[in-house]
Image: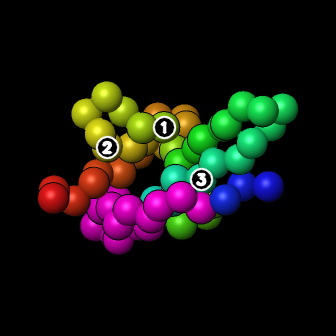
Amino acid sequence: MWEDIEVIECLGERGEIIDVTKQARMIDGQTQQRWLSSRGEEVLIERSDGHFETQNGGEIIARFPD
C-alpha cells in the first residue's frame, strides 16, 4: 500500500494550484517511490530541473520557488 511522504504545492500550466504528493511503498524489501498529482491522480515524473511533468509529457507542473 502506498504511504504519503510529503506534499508539495505546485502550479499547473493553466494557473491552477496542484498538490503533488510523494508516496512510497515497500515491495520485497525494496522501496518504490512515485509522485502523484491531486488532479485526477496522475502519476508524475520529476524532471532534472526539479519541476514535474505528466507521464505522457503533455504538461509541466512547476514547483513554487522556496
Q: Tag 1: Cα neighbours inside 10 Å, few (<14), some, or many (≥20)?
A: some
- The answer to whether residue 13 is visible is no
When the figure is inspected, residue 33 is found, relative to residue 14, above or below; the finding is above
| Residue at horizontal 66 percent and vertical 37 percent from the top | 32
When the figure is inspected, residue 51 is found, relative to residue 1, above or below; the finding is above
Mark with earlier residue (1, 3): 3
Residue at mark 2: 51
Residue at mark 3: 23
What is the three-letter code of the residue carrying label 1? Ile
What is the three-letter code of the residue carrying label 2? His
Mark 2 and mark 3 residues within 8 Å of each other at the beta carbon: no
Q: Quadrant of the N terminus?
A: bottom right
The residue range painted magenta reads 4-19
Residue at mark 1: 45
Mark with earlier residue (2, 1): 1
| Residue at horizontal 30 percent and vertical 62 percent from the top | 11
Q: Secondary structure at mark 3?
A: strand
| Colour mapping | rainbow
| Residue at horizontal 38 percent and vertical 62 percent from the top | 8
Q: Secondary structure at mark 1?
A: strand
View extreme (right): residue: 28
Q: Tag 2: Cα neighbours inside 10 Å, few (<14), some, or many (≥20)?
A: some
Q: Is residue 30 left or right of residue 45?
A: right
Callout count: 3
Real-space Cα separation, disc 2 to disc 1, in angstroms: 9 Å
Q: Is residue 41 left or right of residue 7?
A: right
Q: Position of residue 63 (x, y in %)?
A: 27, 54
